[in-house]
Image: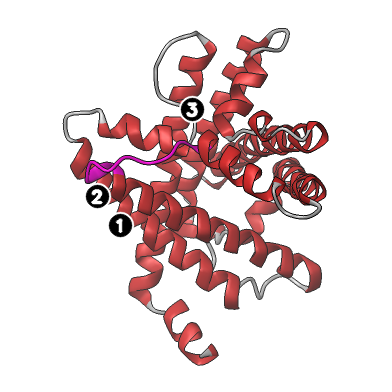
Amino acid sequence: MTSAVHTAHHNGVVKGLGRAGMACYGAVYVIIAYLALQVAFGGGGQEADQTGALQEIASTSFGAVVLWVLAIGLLAFGVWQLLMAAVSYQWHDGKKRTFKRIGAAVRGVVGISLGIAAIRIASGNGSQSGDEKQKEMTARLMELPAGRFIVGLVALIVIGAGIASIVSGVRKSFMKDLDTSELPKSHWVEKLGMVGHIAKGLGIAIVGTLLGIAALDANAAEAGGLDSALRTLADQPFGTVLLVVVAAGFAAFGIYAIAAAKAHRT
């Protein structure tokens, strides 16, 4: 089994599709940035999250075709990340490698989920919004014995993931995962990645905070996904300015993912 995973991981076609999928993943974040700007200025009907981005694409003239291409790319990205979670990140040691593999596993699940959502939307079957999924998942966890404790623990893990992304951006440690010889403008990729990881981490941390509030109040309706996180940010003093800054950060992360796809170490 391990040998088969290693073989698949080093397969040139798998790597190529995975890198193309990473570019697709980046494109989704660029569209999320656009939707976040619409939230900031009180316009638009789509939710500012991954599902909303896919639905925004579906509303365009060639939306269905683009969605099918994105679906293939996102599924490939998900599989590639799961393979990396299983056998990659040998250039890191100890706990760092473990955390990198966990992060890759999460991205793998997200990539496959987005690919499936793109297929559902492209085929006209629709897809649950990120907020609806988050509230439904939280409600189910709340029903379990010690449900509030479990949701609270998940909230801490999500907040931790957000902080880790912010730290990675500040320290620029994400650059260790790139072969900079493949990047003609590596300093620009570094700057985009720094801003993008910080903005992405902030969004994740706010999602975790909403989960924590839901656990404290025993109210699953207070949980929410990225769209709720961004709208919560918009409701703060100087919220419009903050949301514009975060939207710029999401765009930076998306462009970084597109630019860095070819150079990502495997």
Range covered by the magenta-colored residues? 121-130
- Which residue carries the number 1 mark? 72
- Which residue carries the number 2 mark? 68
- Crowding at label 2, few (<14), some or many (≥20) Cα neighbours within 10 Å? some
Q: Is residue 163 left or right of residue 60?
A: right
Residue 190 picture location, percent across and down: 60, 43
Residue 259 picture location, percent across and down: 45, 46
Q: Dividing the picture into quarters, in which one does residue 55 lie?
A: top left
Q: How many marks?
A: 3
Residue type at mark 1: give it.
Ile
Residue at 81% x, 52% y is 146
Residue 257 picture location, percent across and down: 49, 47
Q: Is residue 266 left or right of residue 173?
A: left
Residue type at mark 3: give it.
Ala
Q: Is residue 140 left or right of residue 51?
A: right
What secondary structure characterizes most of the magenta part?
Answer: loop
